[in-house]
């Protein structure tokens, strides 16, 4: 008899485990027979109304599909985890320096970026993002500057035409809004006119890419975002002689410049105050333009720093939170940031810069701003980011009606569909109403 109970206990334990799995918080079931790792953010998730047809145009009526999300549309690049785009950027300082750019060619760019020997992967599981840097000479005429930078832009386009790859996203004019006034001393109106012409040229050269106009916050700050820090330009911001990053976007919008996305870096302690409300103020302000927003560089300090005599470190002490820079503070800011992003669908990506302590350093000083420590162990912020991002992934079983239609609730992104015995396909699902041809 004891052997009989032993045999019965195996399937019984299996049934109990299955029941526990589906009753736990690991998955959350929805009315569409879908499951996700967490509550999908209402400001971002949507009900997809899909109609399925085969390659001959016939309706796929009364057909069951298993739908599993394999990539979010929300851009993330955090090295060892949470990455859905490949970053392409030169590390050659000569290709960034103004005088060296005078002689730049497509062949030099192809060789520097290894575009032929190691071309970007065009696997649709990953986006491709290219950064085309502009240089910041101290003294230059705006006409000369435009000639050199526009030629470099044209050479980048020629290089990518040669390998027949169009990047999904291209960052342009990174930090130009900041440097044109504080470092280069260019005429404001001439700089605005150049930026508009540059954007239009980029649109012409890269018609199939999404253009990210990447801003640099001014180090003197706007007093309504954070306390003024040493920098000498706060009065210029107040009088309007110097444009804030929001003011720069206002000018670009007035000119109807054809860029797609506002890019901005957000570094708590150096660029911005330690208060989460200032993060919300900034992105509320940027959202007024109705354009998508990409946080192309984001980090939060998690350990105290020794300022020494370096003004950069002095800013960390000036903007130090009440309880100091700690891993607990970093984790709390992450939680608040993600809660805000959940409710603001215009924010379409965020890159945690300095993913590991030791990755980001200045003069051999290691910035403790990563989500992992130097030894590779994970900080609390890592787990917060992991749980937040993975909670968005959805998996569903749906069945079409007589008209080939079905619906489910989920996040925009790339999905793998399976139907029949062996059929499968990868489909981008990002619109509330979508016709899918298989």
Image: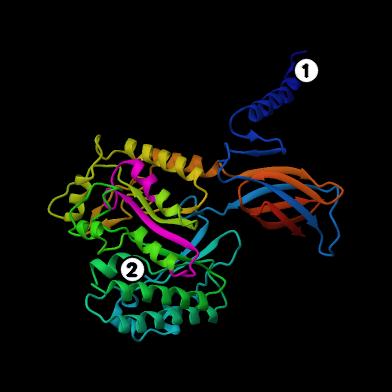
- The nearer-to-camera label among 1 and 2 is 2
Residue placed farthest to the top in the image?
A: 1
Q: Whole-percent x and y of residue 340?
A: 45, 42
**Residue 265 disc label:** none
Taking the image as shown, residue 174 lies to the left or right of residue 419, namely left
Residue 181, placed above or below residue 244: below
Q: Is residue 78 visible?
A: no
Part of the protein shown in magenta? 255-282
How many residues crowd mark 2 within 10 Å: few (<14), some (14–19), many (20+)? Answer: many
Taking the image as shown, residue 255 lies to the left or right of residue 168, namely left
Disc 2 marks which residue?
176
Q: Whole-percent x and y of residue 233?
A: 20, 59
Q: Earlier in the sequence, mark 1 or mark 2?
A: 1
In which image quadrant can residue 181 be found? bottom left
Quadrant containing the C terminus is: bottom right
Q: Is residue 224 visible?
A: yes
Disc 1 marks which residue?
4
Q: Does the magenta-highlighted stretch encompass residue 184?
A: no
The residue depicted at 29 percent of the width and 71 percent of the height is: 188
Q: Whole-percent x and y of residue 73?
A: 56, 54
In which image quadrant can residue 427 be found? bottom right
Q: Does the magenta-highlighted stretch encompass residue 257?
A: yes
* Secondary structure found at label 1: helix
């Amino acid at each position: 008899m004891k052997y009989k109970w032993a045999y019965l206990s195996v399937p019984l334990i299996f049934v109990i485990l299955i029941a526990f799995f589906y009753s736990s918080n690991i998955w959350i079931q929805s009315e569409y027979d879908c499951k996700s790792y967490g509550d999908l953010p209402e400001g971002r998730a949507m009900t997809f109304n899909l109609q399925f047809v085969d390659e001959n145009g016939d309706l796929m009526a009364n057909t069951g599909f298993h739908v599993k999300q394999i990539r979010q549309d929300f851009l993330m690049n955090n090295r060892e985890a949470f990455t859905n785009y490949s970053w392409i950027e030169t590390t050659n300082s000569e290709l960034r320096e103004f005088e060296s750019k005078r002689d730049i060619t497509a062949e030099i760019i192809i060789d520097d970026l290894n575009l032929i020997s190691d071309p970007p992967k065009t696997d649709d599981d990953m986006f491709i993002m290219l950064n085309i840097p502009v240089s910041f000479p101290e003294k230059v005429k705006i006409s000369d500057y435009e000639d050199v930078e526009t030629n470099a832009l044209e050479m980048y386009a020629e290089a990518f035409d040669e390998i027949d790859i169009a990047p999904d996203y291209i960052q342009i004019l990174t930090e130009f809004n900041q440097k044109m006034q504080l470092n280069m001393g260019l005429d404001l109106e001439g700089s605005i006119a150049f930026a508009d012409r540059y954007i239009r040229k980029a649109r012409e050269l890269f018609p199939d890419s999404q253009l990210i106009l990447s801003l640099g916050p001014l180090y003197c700050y706007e007093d309504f975002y954070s306390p003024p820090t040493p920098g000498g330009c706060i009065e210029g911001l107040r009088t309007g002689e110097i444009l804030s990053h929001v003011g720069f976007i206002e000018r670009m919008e007035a000119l109807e410049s054809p860029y797609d996305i506002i890019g901005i870096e957000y570094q708590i302690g150096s660029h911005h105050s330690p208060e989460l409300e200032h993060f919300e103020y900034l992105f509320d302000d940027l959202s007024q333009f109705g354009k998508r927003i990409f946080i192309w560089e984001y980090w939060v300090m998690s350990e105290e720093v020794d300022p020494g005599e370096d003004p950069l470190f002095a800013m960390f002490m000036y903007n130090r939170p009440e309880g100091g820079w700690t891993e607990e503070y970093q984790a709390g800011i992450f939680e608040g940031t993600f809660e805000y992003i959940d409710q603001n669908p215009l924010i379409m990506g965020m890159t945690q810069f300095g993913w590991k302590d030791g990755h980001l350093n200045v003069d051999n000083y290691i910035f403790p701003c990563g989500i992992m420590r130097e030894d590779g162990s994970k900080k609390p912020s890592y787990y917060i980011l992991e749980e937040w991002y993975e909670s968005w992934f959805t998996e569903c079983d749906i069945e079409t009606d007589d008209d080939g239609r079905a619906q489910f609730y989920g996040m925009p992104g790339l999905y793998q569909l399976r139907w029949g015995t062996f059929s499968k396909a990868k489909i981008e699902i990002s619109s509330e109403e979508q016709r899918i041809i298989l």
